[in-house]
Amino acid sequence: MPMPFTDSTPLLSEGEALRARAATDGYLFFRGLLPAEAILPVRADLLEVVAKHGWLADEATGTLNVEALAAVPESAMRTDIGVSVAAYDDVQRLENVHRLPHHPRLLALYKMLLADEVLVHARHIIRMISPHPAIFPTPAHQDFPLVQGTQNTWTCWFPLGECPRTMGSLKVLSGSHKLGYLPLKRALGAGGITVQTCPDEESEDDWVEGDFALGDVLTFPALTVHKALPSQFKDRIRLSFDVRYQALSEPVEEKSLLPHCGLTWKQIYEGWESDELQYYWRKLPLNYSGWNPTLLQYGQRIC
């Protein structure tokens, strides 16, 4: 039986205890951190995009028209996301998508966890994992080579709906952040990379996972190894967020402030009702780091 996540919800008001647990486990899991009324409108917006492109069979369950989706050629797909390039551009234009990461409960969590003012990365990733034949589960990896900046950047992962393990929730290698940066090799799935661990660094008892209810949140620093479980549903779409947070005083790589698609911010902001969050990072005293391409080079791990 897989090891379950440790629920850190009781520690939400205790910053020192949260930081101590994170230092030991390399992740934190919270039950019901986000309210349903914050998540469900975003879910509805995403499913409206899926319907617009002709792939939705049932909005309530997220059941897909599998034949229509499979007819999309691989060349038109965002295989790291799960839907077509055109559909993902539509998703990135949604104002609600860019507002949800600034929810007060998330900002309060990271302010406590980081003990500093919080920078919300502008580059939000919305996974829409589908049964298209070109889609593979995300392999075991660390986020740091892909994000860079500070190693103390935290990923916040949460589904936009119920997400049991059988639908492809995330799995974390507990304590793996203590291993430091791990060499890479090629792999199928989002990111296209996987880490190389040694036999004494990884056992089944070290991997933790769980079923996610609406509002549950998983978070971990940039060196924690994690992966997606394979979905056992052949006609469902898994909707989830990858949002990243860091201390405002630490370095950030400029790509973290670019759109996660081929659109410009000007194109994304067209039609928004509010300009409150438009270019918000330009008002902040940021410390930029350079991009290190050697972090994404493949190397052989010597155990």
Image: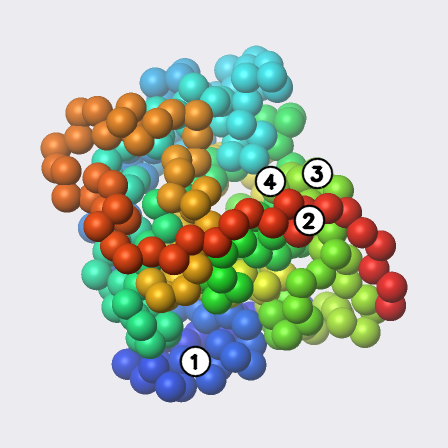
Q: Which image quadrant: the N terminus?
A: bottom right
Nearer the observer, 209 or 98: 98
Secondary structure at badge 4 equals loop
Q: What residue is drawn where x is 60% and y is 49%?
A: 292
Q: Hey, which quadrant is residue 97 in on the image?
A: top left
145 shown above or below 88: below
Q: Along the horizontal axis of the image, is 303 left or right of 207?
A: right
Disc 3 from disc 4: Cα separation: 7 Å
Which mark is drawn over residue 19? Answer: 1
Mark 2 = which residue?
Answer: 294
Which mark is drawn over residue 190? Answer: 4
Secondary structure at badge 1 equals helix
Disc 2 from disc 4: Cα separation: 19 Å
Which mark is drawn over residue 82? Answer: none
- Of tags 2 and 4, which is closer to the observer? 2
Counting from the top left corner in percent of width and height, residue 74 is at: 61, 19
* First reached walking from the N terminus: tag 2 or tag 3: 3
Q: Residues within 10 Å of mark 4 (few under 14, many from 20)?
A: many
* First reached walking from the N terminus: tag 4 or tag 1: 1
Which mark is drawn over residue 188? Answer: 3
Amino acid type, residue under disc 2 in the picture:
Thr
Whether residues under marks 4 and 1 lie with C-beta atoms below 8 angstroms apart, the answer is no
Amino acid type, residue under disc 4 in the picture:
Ala
Whether residues under marks 3 and 1 lie with C-beta atoms below 8 angstroms apart, the answer is no
Extreme residue in the right direction: 302
